[in-house]
Image (tube, helix red, strand yellow):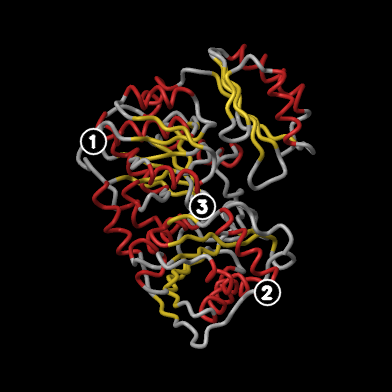
Amino acid sequence: MAGIFKAYDVRGIVPTQLDEAIARQIGLAFQHVLDAEDRANGNTVVVSRDMRSHSAGLATALIDGLTAAGLDVLDIGLATTPMNYFATGHTKAAGGVQVTASHNPAQYNGFKFSRHGARPVSGDHGIALMEAKVAAGDLPRAGRPGTVSTGTIMEAYREHLRPFLRHQEGRRLKVAVDAANGMSVLYRPLLEEMGIELIPLYFELDGSFPNHEANPLKEENLRDLMRLVASSGADLGVAFDGDADRAAFIDEKGVAIGSDLMTALIGGELLGREPGKAVLYDLRSSRAVHEYIEEKGGVPVRERVGHSFMKATLRNRHGIFGGELAGHYYFRDNYYADSSLLAVIEVLNLLRETGKPLSELVQPLRRYAKSPEINFEVEDKQGKMDELAKRYADATIDYLDGITLSYPDWWANVRPSNTEPFLRLVLEARTPEELARHQEELIGILGHPAEH
């Protein structure tokens, strides 16, 4: 079981790191996470799974553990992670578990958890607590096992999404969508009802991911979609990840758009209806995001990386929307949870309302030169961040997540990964030349970038 309990979920290689026996133990351990507030409307846990070859077996074992602990289970079968979040909120369940390894290769699997109202499970009272309980064998069984019922959530999800779609009249938009053989295949009927001409790519469920890795953050995984957008004359390209909780966007010229700039665009669209609201962005985002949200009459809120932090702050600040560089988009009116499909809907709304191509809408946000996220394998992560603090002592420094160094003309963030053994660097500058200079300087301190 070494290493399968991550910051935000459980994930490992099947069967060497994760198997059905461990899944059963994790099901038993989940009872420790759910408190009286979670159980206010009963003991039900929503369980669903992705299309990987081992997901059905792991889900069955997980359900065995949950019911042995006295929890009732609503099994909704094959579903995206956002559908699991929605089902957990919509049915007022005590919690939810999605069996998935997201964008990881076929040999991986895992579990994503939530509490009542689709609240994230994380920190000392979440994943770490389950790990401790499994290690200690503190897995009590109930005198009376829970029940299992099956159901479907698709029709309720369709009804939930429908009111967000506006302005279907006018030009019929052509949208190329790469499902990457992942769970967004289930979204096909929903997409086709959005008044678009859908151009589907890799819309066959296949947990071996035969065409490319289901990770839209890597540009090599977007190349087929970029070509399809160009060859079909599409107005928009969308790539989903394996469990469909993330989306990447391609403009009509076949150019990928950073998720931070998409956060700004979608945030601006929502602020047009509700000015003065808070919009969250993670601290790796371009300065243009903060500026644009202010220009649109919103309150920009900078937050550390990670869905648990984003969701908690969005809820606490009564924010309307938030987005992360990884392609997660969070909506107040979606139980503060992420929904890739809602992000697509808001982009369609924007294109229909303005009548402008996506490249033209994004252009005013391309104000700075920005690096991708660069990984470094570093033994002493804290020591290296301390070294940066000394070297750039004249910067404005904050420690919200790792270390951020800010100057008038450039900034950099270096943070330890929550999921992998890396320090991650992102930097931005006013000009490409300035960016290249500071990037070379920082690589000289951090060492050779990792191949990842």
Q: Which mark is residue 273?
A: 1
| N-terminal label among 3 and 1 | 3
| N-terminal label among 1 and 2 | 2
Tell me which residue sits at (56%, 40%) in the image: 217
Mark 1 and mark 2 residues within 8 Å of each other at the beta carbon: no
- Name, please, the residue furthest toward the front: 36
What residue is shown with label 3?
Answer: 202
Q: What x and y, as percent, mark residue 249?
A: 45, 37
Q: Which one is closest to the eye, mark 1 or mark 2?
A: 2
Q: What x and y, as percent, mark residue 85?
A: 42, 58
**Where is the C terminus found, in terms of image quarters?**
top right
Q: Amino acid at mark 1?
A: Arg
Q: Residues within 10 Å of mark 3 (few under 14, many from 20)?
A: some
- Name, please, the residue furthest toward the bottom: 143
Q: Which mark is residue 137?
A: 2
Q: Which one is closest to the eye, mark 2 or mark 3?
A: 2
Label 3: which secondary element: loop
Q: What x and y, as percent, mark residue 406?
A: 57, 19
Q: Is residue 419 positioned above or below 324 on the image?
A: below
